[in-house]
Image (cartoon, grey):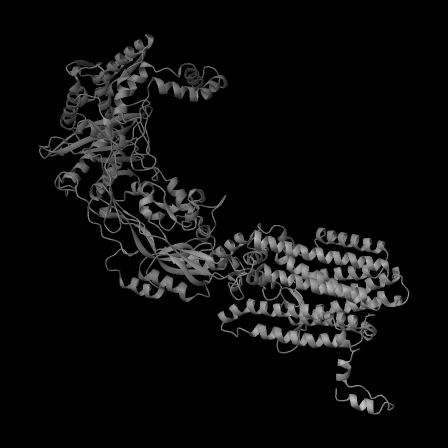
Amino acid sequence: MTDSGTLRVSPVSVRRRETFRERALDRESPLRRLDWVLILAIGGLCTLGALLVWGATKPNQVAHGLDPNAFLKKDILNIGIGLSLAALAALVDYRTIRAYAPVVYVASLAGLVAVLVPHVGTRINGSHSWIPIAAGFEVQPAEFAKIAIIVLMAMLLGEQRDSVDIGPDGRDVWLTLAMCALPVLLILAQPDVGTIMVLGFVIFGVISMSGVSSRWVVGLLVVAVLGALVITHLHLLKQYQIDRLTSFTNPAKDTQGFGYNTHQARIAIGSGGWFGEGLFHGTQTNGHFVPEQQTDFVFTVAGEELGLVGSGLLVILVGVVLWRGLSIAARAGDAFGTLVAVGVVCWFGFQAFENIGMTVGIMPVTGLPLPFVSYGGSAMFANMLAVGLLQNVYMRSRT
Amino acid sequence: MSDRSRLRLIVLRVLVISLLATLLGRLWYLQVLAGPQYQQAAADNQVRDIVASAPRGQIVDDLGRRWATNRTALVVSVDRVALLRQHDGGTTVLTRLSRLLGVSYTNLKSKIQLCGPGAPHGCWNGSPYEPIPVSQLKDDITSTRLALQILERKEDFPGVTAELGAVRDYTKPDGALASQVLGYLAPITLDELKKLPKTQQDARRSDLVGRSGLEQEYDGYLRGRPGVTEVAVDHLGAVTSTLSQTVPQPGDEIVTSLDATVQASLEKSLADAVDRAHHTDVKKGGGPADFAAGVVLDALTGHVVAMASYPSYDPNVFVGGISERDYQALQHAPGTPLLDKAYASAYPPGSTFKLVSTAGLLDDGIASLDGTYDCSPSVTVGGREFKNFESESLGLIDLHTTIVKSCDTVYYGLANKDWIRDNSLIDDKKRPIEGVQHAARAFGLGVPVAVDLPGATSGHIADRNNQKLRWEQTKKDACAGAKRRPKGSYLQQLDQEFCTDGWRFNPGDQLNEDIGQGSVLVSPLQLAVAYAALVNGGTVFEPRLVKAIVAPDGTLVANVRAPVRGHLPVSPAILDYIRNAMYDVPLKGTAQDAFTGFPMGRVKVGGKTGTAEVDVQHGLATAWFASFAGRAGEAKPRFVTVIMVDRGGQGGVVAAPSVREVWDSVFGLEHHKAAFPTGAPPAALPRIAVLTGASTSPSPPPSTHALGDLFGPPGLAVRATGWRPGDD
């Protein structure tokens, strides 16, 4: 430390404003209090993800005479941008973020509306989910809406209880539900069933964890079940959506239509055995038998090419992230911090389980990426922002 | 944080752990426990078999003349999957194609329809993912232009291709069709496919299978073995590498004992017989004559030299798949051309059966060679009067004259004696002798015929035993009818009589049987075998149409001899007597008019006419002539010819002249070229021109070369099985 001598020489002088570097390396520095286990787990997931994306895309790129590493490069770029966003989200005090929660919320609503406007949003696979920005970059507002909803819910449900140890009353919950309904309805209009399911789980999780009475928890569960029944019985879903959701229950029935994806996905994973066939050596992957393999079905690459060892490691890394998230929720300095952490855990947890579950045939097929692993900018950025929030809460917690 | 939240946080931790444990457990199951099974699935996923069908073997005559062969043709195929993906399900393209090819839209549509319940005839049985051949073009300039139109206007014909492929060709050597004998090919059915071993099913999915005649009987030899190339593919079915390859093995050639020249002559003589029947008054021995059939047999070897059924059809109508309408038309055409009446159905033989009854009556002692018998105008047995043909009366005559003049009343008298003798044996609790019936079975009548063709008839010979069996099977209806119908009506009386007495073998039954009427039914082939036994010294053959099976490289696979079914239990003296009597039939008997002026000095002809009454009301009869002939001076006549004209009239008037035409052609008489100049069929096997690939003509026309260059080598239709449509 070059500046220490100066300090000793003039002890009475007005304390000079510390440089960024000093602050960063200070014993009290938030950097010293980062959750390094979480960072390592995320790093592991991102590394595995980049390899799997590479494995999924390289054979096809080669076959078409394109840059074999194009997807790998873009994925690494996404991870880099994501890390900076995470750093940003971690450094700004979350209490400041809480103050801006309504702004974030309104901004995300605007994004969700924009995506539905013709000529602004684009339609991919029958749903309006993307806004093209420039030069082939597209933004998926629904990914960011997840963060907005978590932050807003944490603000609404955690506000009064910084000191008082009681749960929010019914009015708060109703208000929260009403505020959540807006983005949910907008996403339903895209339609993006997968994101709706994630949000439903997040909303339920955050409200339950906010300390409301058990009646609310049970009531919400009942409403969710009834809602699912009504949707399926009143034919509010299109037949293809129902087919897609139910094809996993009987995969042998239709191995060419909707069941085809899950059937091929299972063959890919099952054929991996203990150690897999090695990166770039999976016949299912190289023959392009599994569709959407660098995005929604990226886990099948892990299953086929890295085997039980690789795919199991991936599941365990996800588990570490979730476990650390819950620990952060438990030791957060205030209700806002707890609820943000719980919201993020619910998000990652449900999305990861649903994504891996659909590839191994125990969950219905929905278009959800595997956090930190699937290829895709918006999802990666949103995931990284959420990790930033977790670190933010961790750094500023009481012990 | 409240205790409540703390508790719920613990619940959340448990939930996370259990969900992750679930995933790990599922992974363990998929990758370790079920791993091998999925590894197999992954291997199957990327391996496809491409099947190259083998050229079908040829069918040739005794001189090596091709009867059924293969030719290259431009085959127009439709990719059903590609068509269904079009916005209107391919209707526009199919309509356009039907206009270009000049066939109906429904015809095309039915050809690409997958076989299943309610599917039309000509439906597609192969894999739904491989191109379906819908039309074969001729090898001429116009057709070549058609193919080029399809290929050049790809945007107008998406999913349609034109390629060179091998198709069956029936070449009609010497003008001989032999349609029913050759048979035809049709796509393999789902049921047949399921019966095959699993490993063969994919390769044979779109196979053509012999459906009748020799094509069916020798299908296993003719078919050959398809070549299978195993390739690795990606998810779109694009080939990434070849894993293994077997080349197609062409089918074996079938050398028949049929002679195209004799066959052509027989076919023509049948047509002439029908014509003759039509142009002769019924009273003078003509008739409406719906159909006719004939057989020429080598009496010494049991090989069939010619076999025909009239009316016939062009066997090429089945090539490339017959349309539902054409098939129905053929099935319901007058004279049922698809049925071979020469061996697959039986008719009352009339007096030609007297060969059998004479031998039977002589053998069991009812008649004797030196006896004389009363040829009266009629005989009354059991209160019923049995008249002679045209109430002829010749007084006391010997058996020789009886045969030459075909006197029925002599047989009536003998049959009555026979019946009374058998009846008294039954009264004494002994077995009846039934000599005529025994003789009939020994001659191969009324018993299954083992010929190398599918669906041969056994015919029928009535005796006490099967009369009773039939009664037991059918009396229920008759007895019900006897109760139901108005009492005293004609039908009620018939039913009543059958219900109570139908089991009885009456004297009248024996009388009718001995002159080849009543319930006696034989096929022309059966009768030819019986007459061959008469002239060859008593050997009854199981007739054969095929002489040899030869591998494509010319090596002999098998020599086919007609097995001996048995020897007649009749003394040679009796056979000589009957044969000598029959030599007089064309000279001074019932076939005298038909053989006036025939050079008997060069070829000695014998035989027996038959006129079986089938419609007493209109005086219609089925005409027969069973004949044998050989060059004068030879010990045994070499050939037997039997011709039958259903409801054609009298045997001597309608059938015998046609047999004379056949003899003319066989021996080269009366301005005909001899089919067998030596008087016998060729002993040696013919040399067969070897087929290379599918091309048949020694120097293909230039257009074929040009197209070969255009569409790749003029090879075989290459197709892939187990194609999968892209994911959608």
Task: Give the percent coordinates (x, y) of residue B134.
Answer: 41, 54
The image position of residue B362, as x and y in percent, is 20, 17
Viewer-proximal residue among A301 and A235: A301
Q: Is A203 above or below relative to B194?
A: below
Quadrant housing residue B537: top left
Q: Quadrant of the N terminus of chain B?
A: bottom right
Residue at 36% across, 47% down:
B318
Compared to residue B212, the image places residue B537 above or below, namely: above
Tell me if A80 is positioned left or right of B385 in this view.
Answer: right
Residue B271: x %, y % from top left: 26, 39
Residue A328 lies, with reference to residue A360, above or below; the image says below
Residue B368, picture quadrant: top left
Work out which residue is located at the far right of the displayed protein and give it. A164
Number of marks: 0
Where's residue B31, x and y in %?
57, 55
**Residue B597 visible somewhere in the drawing:** no
Compared across the picture, whether B527 is left or right of A328 comes to left
> In the figure, is residue B630 to the left or right of B277?
left
Dividing the image into 4 quarters, which one contains the C terminus of chain B? bottom right
Q: Nearer the viewer, residue A327 or B375?
A: A327
Which residue lies at the image location 28% right of the left edge and 42% below the top edge?
A: B178
Would residue B636 be visible to someone looking at this image? yes
When the figure is inspected, residue A36 is found, relative to residue B2, above or below; the finding is below
